[in-house]
Image: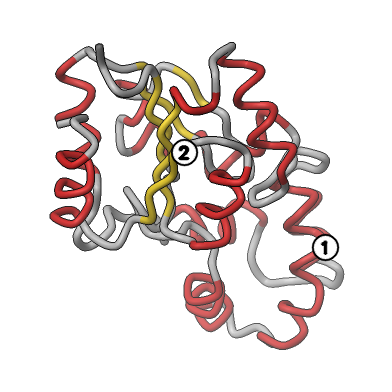
């Protein structure tokens, strides 16, 4: 018997760079010669709503950037956000590909991401080839590490939580998943992940 039925991956910080974390935001803000402090003051509340799909990209940008006239467009700025996404150095992507190839597990995502960046990242890096289910925050209307997102994942999958393995780079998300009954691994690099998966008889 296989140790798990489902393996769920975070995306940013595990497979790809964080699409819109503080480093990426600072880079884009500098490119457009904006006031970083002013942007960051407006970002948290708008970003939470965006990642839960309560607002779209245009509304997010209206709240954080286009509250006054700019010399560039929404599309210019959104494309700059997209450009921050690259394959993470020491990525788990080869592990994802190997697990997908075994066809032993249902493979999916459990990640915090706004809809437009999420859809871009899934398409640009061909993640849908491996993900059979996507429990992204923008699709379920909940964000990690809130306990409800793990409960929702368990309900959607229709499994006992111990049959679900979750991989994330943030300790808070790992702890919250474990508190919900999932088996959870903190990602620190490809080889360490492979070691932990071998110990769990996954690979």
* Residue 117, quarter of the rendered image: top right
- Examine the rendering and report whether any part of residue 30 can be seen: yes
Label 1 Cα neighbours within 10 Å, binned few <14 / some 14-19 / many ≥20: few
Q: State the image coordinates of residue 199 (x, y, percent, origin top left).
A: 18, 42
Viewer-side residue, 127 vs 82: 127
Q: State the image coordinates of residue 187 (x, y, percent, origin top left).
A: 33, 56
Tag nearer the camera, 1 or 2: 1
Q: Distance of mark 1 from mark 2, alpha carbons?
A: 22 Å
Tell me: residue 88, above or below residue 21.
Answer: above
Residue sitting at 40 percent across and 16 percent down? 132
Work out which quarter of the rendered image holds the C terminus and state it.
top left
Residue sitting at 74 percent across and 48 percent down? 50
* Residue 9, quarter of the rendered image: top left
Tell me: residue 64, above or below residue 169.
Answer: below
Viewer-side residue, 122 vs 71: 122
Label 2 Cα neighbours within 10 Å, binned few <14 / some 14-19 / many ≥20: few
Residue sitting at 39 percent across and 44 percent down? 167
Viewer-side residue, 77 vs 178: 178
Residue 45: mark in rendering: 1
Work out which quarter of the rendered image holds the N terminus and state it.
top left
Residue sitting at 23 percent across and 60 percent down? 189
Tell me: residue 142, above or below residue 92.
Answer: above
Residue 120: mark in rendering: 2
Tell me: residue 57, above or below residue 154.
Answer: below
**Rendered image coloring scheme:** secondary structure
Viewer-side residue, 67 vs 122: 122
Q: State the image coordinates of residue 120 (x, y, percent, origin top left).
A: 46, 38
Residue 18: mark in rendering: none
Which badge, 1 or 2, is on the more N-terminal residue? 1
Label 2 element class: helix
- Examine the rendering and report whether any part of residue 65 can be seen: no
Horizontal side of residue 136 vs 183, given as left or right = right
């Amino acid at each position: 018997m296989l140790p798990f039925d489902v393996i769920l991956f975070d995306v940013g910080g595990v497979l790809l760079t964080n699409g819109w974390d503080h480093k990426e935001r600072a880079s884009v803000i500098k490119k457009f010669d904006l006031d970083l402090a002013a942007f960051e003051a407006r970002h948290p509340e708008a970003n939470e709503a965006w990642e839960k799909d309560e607002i779209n990209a245009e509304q997010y940008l209206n709240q954080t950037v286009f509250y006054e006239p700019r010399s560039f467009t929404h599309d210019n700025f959104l494309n700059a956000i997209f450009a921050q996404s690259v394959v993470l150095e020491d990525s788990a992507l080869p592990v994802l590909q190997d697990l997908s190839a075994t066809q032993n597990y249902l493979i999916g995502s459990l990640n915090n991401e706004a809809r437009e960046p999420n859809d871009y990242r899934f398409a640009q890096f061909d993640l849908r080839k491996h993900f059979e289910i996507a429990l992204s925050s923008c699709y379920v209307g909940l964000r990690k590490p809130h306990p409800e997102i793990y409960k929702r994942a368990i309900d959607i999958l229709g499994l006992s939580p111990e049959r679900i393995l979750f991989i994330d780079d943030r300790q808070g998300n790992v702890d919250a998943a474990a508190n919900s009954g999932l088996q959870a691994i903190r990602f620190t690099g490809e080889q360490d992940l492979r070691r932990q998966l071998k110990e769990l008889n996954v690979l």
